[in-house]
Amino acid sequence: MPRLTLSSLLEDILELALPELSRAEGLAASVIRDQILSGRMVLLANPNHHEVRPTLVGQPSGIKVNANIGTSPLRNDAGKELEKLRVAEAAGADTVMDLSTAGDLNAIRIGMLQATRLPLGTVPLYALAQTVVEAGRDPAEITEGQILAEIRTQAEQGVDFMTVHCGLTMRGAELASRERRLLGIVSRGGSIIARWMAKNGRENPFLTRYDDILDIAREHNVTLSLGDGLRPGAGADAGDAAQWDEVAVLGDLQRRAMQAGVQAMIEGPGHVPMDQVEAQIRTMKRLVNGAPLYVLGPLVTDCAPGYDHIAGAIGGALAVRAGADFLCYLTPAEHLTLPDAEDVRQGVMASRVAAQAASSAMGRPSALAREQAVSEGRRDLDWTKLAEHALDPCEVARRRAEHSGEKECAMCGKFCAIRMLSDV
Amino acid sequence: MPRLTLSSLLEDILELALPELSRAEGLAASVIRDQILSGRMVLLANPNHHEVRPTLVGQPSGIKVNANIGTSPLRNDAGKELEKLRVAEAAGADTVMDLSTAGDLNAIRIGMLQATRLPLGTVPLYALAQTVVEAGRDPAEITEGQILAEIRTQAEQGVDFMTVHCGLTMRGAELASRERRLLGIVSRGGSIIARWMAKNGRENPFLTRYDDILDIAREHNVTLSLGDGLRPGAGADAGDAAQWDEVAVLGDLQRRAMQAGVQAMIEGPGHVPMDQVEAQIRTMKRLVNGAPLYVLGPLVTDCAPGYDHIAGAIGGALAVRAGADFLCYLTPAEHLTLPDAEDVRQGVMASRVAAQAASSAMGRPSALAREQAVSEGRRDLDWTKLAEHALDPCEVARRRAEHSGEKECAMCGKFCAIRMLSDV
């Protein structure tokens, strides 16, 4: 197995962060260090991000949850995105990605980096596409020089992890064409690169210039999130040749990253029926050398627009049990419109429910301790204890507020099962 | 294996209902008939319920979803419960249970039976408990005569299925005592019966008078929902001796129901960690002779008050894949307060997402057709088609309303992946 060529920068970050990480994760410092060197764990922390909270992703650290925020051409309000950032933090997100595609993207990104200590991720291709499209040109006109310049700019600004769709090849795009798939390519970044390759008749520039990207990433400890441009956009497309072709390429790119002293994680599907989630996650994990898996959902049904946070929570829980490390939330707005602040809160909570359910099923000590504490609070009708250990203390308090004078909850009142047997 | 002794009443109901059931379920009439005779499927329809829609529960009919509504001592407004009934119907619930414990329970129940064609379920013990408690007496003073009279009254009113906690024995209650369990008995009905047995020093009257209950049920084609008074109230209690003791008794009671010409289904847990859901469902199904399983959740984490509809959707999807037939919803208000109308809507939709995800993973033709239709709508940016086949067309329309003039959704706008490749 490949081992990470540890950069002096990452060595310095580790030295500073290990004591607190060890305490927070309940893992020996030597285990964390060894997992990072094996590539099965990454430490998100770009020193250019002022006061960033170094965050571990990968087995056996705790499952992390990411919230995607950012402007879109049809809903472009940087202030609202900062509000969503605060809501995501309050709801317990571990990281945030700025996926803005409208407005002053540099200003938005810098504003977010200043506003949060959570690791911030981006998709540099979005800024590149916005620039050319706003100049009235085609995304296919993006140059290799622009790509490297944008990645360098964002790395210098302090972005902690970046999605780069390096694994999408001309062969993969052909395998994912409409003739073979129900929904073709549904990744925004993947579709731009596929267009670029088709128009230019050349291989993906993120792949051909991968060594240059690695150089920039190493310089600032930017963790690469190797994107799944060919993720299935419908359950019917899950697990097809296009998807696996890209995963195999990502496995090679993960090895090259390790050799270059760059941390990498792997993005995963997408729309995957329940019966395929475990097989997909386990096979991916094998193909990418055990690197951390960062999954979007998976969505176990295509039919739930308005409720994709729930479809994603079902898939996410299954994925975590099968080995996924990092859940990218989905909100009730997915597939329909840009999420608002309440959607963000619902999305983070749904992913946290999935992570807690899977973690306790996996016997993780901190997850089991939480289950025990909440149930003890419930047994004793001790609402303070229950709220303290619940995933969302504020929601417990809000729901209870109307009946805070009552010992029982308002569902059962005097027919409370717990009280019914208290004197027999 | 036991076979159902078909009553002439059920024979008449089947004769009338089979053509429409066959069409709606996509099953041959002979298959439905045979499954009912084998006890693996039940037909909910009490002829006293005017214009009730006969509804099948059990393999291989479609997975059904139930919504619990009803007043409680701390929230007692019959009008609001009727509003929740309408919301549950609009959201796509297949059945409704009236779990009222406050107000004029007869009037509330009759009002609901008149207001809906969906099969209505109840827990007769709640009315019995309310009567004695309002008279200032102890639930332990409920008499066997009162129990049979209440069941008869409700059967004559038209209640289609009733939860009766016949499987809870003195031995089971002892096994579930606080000394052995984190949370003891959490079923409302179960706790009342445990109190009754402890105070009277006698066996569960629903068990000792089971033959009389069967007589009433047969007379009106009331389907018995054999309750799980000892269901685990915490993940830590799942699968303990108390739970299995009750399930084994329920298996015997299901056989006796079949011999008496009474349809029966079995209620299931409860709080169950993810890693135990499949084993629990498969083992239960075996112990109860393949009878339909009616599951509450299961809740795969104790830590999600405010989000138990999501914890329940994860468990429900796993349970359906393992063989559960009928999902009792959980709402975001579970464990905290009585649900309001919006909670009811969220609860029904969460269960429907779980049912759809599991059904498509099981290859059910109608579920797969729906997946295909929604994804075709998505591929073609045909919002009308997408909404038509989505689980909640109204929510799609509501979310889209603000941007109905746009072809793409407001998440990506001009960076829509589907449009990005439309000209290459």
Image (cartoon, coloured by chain):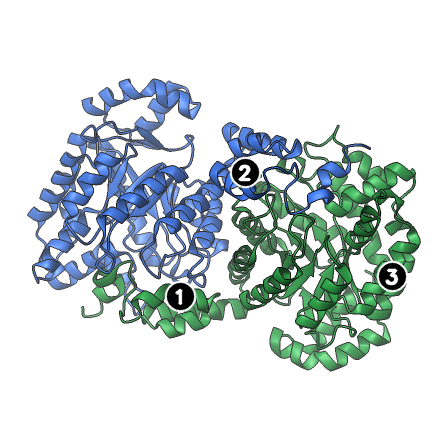
Chain colours: A green, B blue
* Mark 3 lies on residue: A214
Q: Nearer the viewer, mark 2 or mark 1?
A: 1
Is A407 located above or below residue B305 in the figure? below
* Mark sitting earlier along the chain (2/1): 2
Residue A196 x, y percent position in the rendering: 86, 42
Discs 3, 1: same chain: yes
* Mark 2 lies on residue: A303
* Mark sitting earlier along the chain (2/3): 3
In the rendered structure, the answer to whether residue A204 lies left or right of residue B302 reads right
SS of the residue under disc 1:
helix
Q: In the figure, residue A226 lies in which quadrant? A: bottom right
Disc 3: host chain: A
Front residue of A137 and B262: A137
* Mark 1 lies on residue: A398
Mark 1: few/some/many CA within 10 Å (<14, 14-19, 20+): few
Count of labels shown?
3
Q: Nearer the viewer, mark 3 or mark 1?
A: 1
Q: Residue at x 14, y 34 (%)?
A: B156
Rounded to the nearest angstrom, the CA distance separating label 2 from label 1 is 31 Å
Res. A64 in view: no
